Image (cartoon, grey):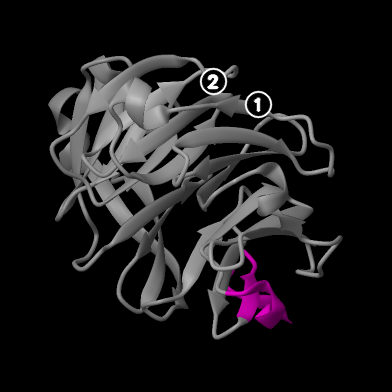
Amino acid sequence: MKAVLILLFFAVSVSKVQGQVFDSLHWKKNGEYLINQDDIWSVDVLGNVYIAKNKVLQKFDSTGVLKFSQSIKSFGRIKEIQSINTMKLVTFSEEQQTVCLLDNTLTLSEECLDLSNFDIGNASHIAISGQSDKLWVVDQLNSKLLLLSLNGTNQFQEIKNLKGILNMNQIESIQEVENHLFLIDSSRIIFEFDLYGSLIRTYKFDFFKSLSIKDKSFVLLLNDKLNIRQINESTTDFIELPTIGIQEVKLSGKFFYFRTENKILKYSLTLRN
């Protein structure tokens, strides 16, 4: 229960709510966005939703209104979209091995970054860093992790031989939270690194479809529920999902964004009166 309360910013103590937490929780639907099976999406800190579909990138505001739409044919197939801040967005194409910077109107702000210039064999994933204008890149082919500068300089940090040192399997996703980097491999082991790229600890879970990290908690998507587990603690809670067929979860502010086969559903959790 403590993990749920921390995640949701509830101004109550565990002792006050005790075992009534889950009976008192209520999912409230706040909006939805149409998405196709192969589309790529993300959400930023303001609740703007980005969807790349049919060589077009769309930006919807937090109320679901389409604000901007931009052709991205020249970018190649987009694999990931991430928000650097409210004014800057980055797209990653594994097909072209490029990273492109866009402004808040989805306009290309400068020439795309060619990752081959950094001696990267095959970039497979990226993650925005909390360090100004820095980007983490996974080079799956060469089993290394790089922290690159987006301003065009060649100064960067590198961690080599990930597979050999950590006995890591194929990396499936990567994200940085509060200057800590989390890598998730195909065996569902989560590797946590510090600001300097040193391994802090690992976490092993039997199964989860998707992972988001917020307020020092792992939010793990299972088949029919969310498993919310505090990082570095054994405290773990489960919450039933609001609908069936959920494939992925992301969080922004107090809202949960669930991807199904053809929609992104926006929900909030509240306490019943």
SS of the residue at dot 2?
Answer: loop
Q: Is residue 21 left or right of residue 73?
A: left
Q: Residue at x 21, y 68 (%)?
A: 245
From the image, tell me which residue sits under label 1.
157
**Viewport quadrant of the C terminus:** top left
Q: Which residue, given by chain and number where applicable, does mark 2 sit on?
A: 197
Q: What's the distance in space between the residues labelled 1 and 2, CA to CA?
A: 8 Å
Q: Is residue 66 above or below residue 85?
A: below
Q: Earlier in the sequence, mark 1 or mark 2?
A: 1
Q: Which residues are magenta?
A: 56-76
Decide which of 192, 213 is in the foreground and name it.
Answer: 192
* Residue 191 shown left or right of residue 204 in the figure: right
Q: Quadrant of residue 233?
A: top left
Please check the rendered image and state whether residue 37 is part of the magenta-colored stretch, yes or no. no
Of 271 and 86, nearer the camera is 86
Q: Is residue 223 visible?
A: yes
Confirm or deny contact between disc 1 and disc 2 (CB under 8 A): yes
Image location (x, y in percent) of residue 58: 63, 76
Q: Position of residue 24 (x, y in %)?
A: 22, 41
Q: Is residue 62 magenta?
A: yes
